[in-house]
Image: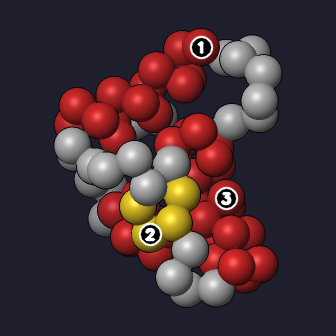
Amino acid sequence: MRQELRTKIIEVCDKKIASKGDNVGLSFYAFFANKNNNPELLMEAATWWIQTHQLDHFVKANKIKQMMLSNL
C-alpha cells in the first residue's frame, strides 16, 4: 500500500477516535469522499481490507491504525 494512503488512513482513524472514542468502528469507505474521484486508490484500500486481510465490514479504528503503523 502506498504511503499516501497509509498516512490518510492513520489521520482518519485519529479523527474518528478523537470524536467518537476508542471503541469506534469504521469501514474502508471512511477514507474517501462520497464521490468516487480516485477509483485506483479506492480499489487499493478495498483490496488491502477485503482480500489481503479479510477484515469484516466494520473494524475498530484502533486496530486499523495499528495495522498501518505495523506496515501490514
Residue at mark 1 to residue at mark 2: CA–CA distance: 24 Å
Residue lying furthest front? 57
Other-residue count near label 3 (Cα within 10 Å), few / some / many at <14 / 14–19 / ≥20: some
Residues 26 and 63: in front is 26
Q: Earlier in the sequence, mark 1 or mark 2?
A: 1
How far across and down, in percent of the image, does residue 35 sit? 78, 21
Residue at mark 2 to residue at mark 3: CA–CA distance: 12 Å
Q: Earlier in the sequence, mark 1 or mark 3?
A: 3
Residue 12: numbered disc: 3
Q: Earlier in the sequence, mark 2 or mark 3?
A: 3
Q: Amino acid at mark 3?
A: Val
Q: Measuring 51% from the left and 82% from the top, which residue is drawn there?
A: 23
Residue 8: numbered disc: none
Other-residue count near label 1 (Cα within 10 Å), few / some / many at <14 / 14–19 / ≥20: few
1 displayed left or right of 24? left
Residue 3 can be seen, yes or no? no
Q: Measuring 64% from the left and 44% from the top, which residue is drawn there?
A: 31
Q: Amino acid at mark 2?
A: Lys
Residues 21 and 62: in front is 21
> Number of labelled discs?
3
Q: How is the image coloured?
A: secondary structure
Other-residue count near label 2 (Cα within 10 Å), few / some / many at <14 / 14–19 / ≥20: some
Question: Label 2, on which residue?
Answer: 60
Q: Measuring 51% from the left and 43% from the top, which residue is drawn there?
A: 28
How far across and down, in percent of the image, does residue 3 sit? 51, 42
Residue 29 can be seen, yes or no? yes
Question: Label 1, on which residue?
Answer: 39
12 displayed left or right of 50? right
Element under disc 3: helix
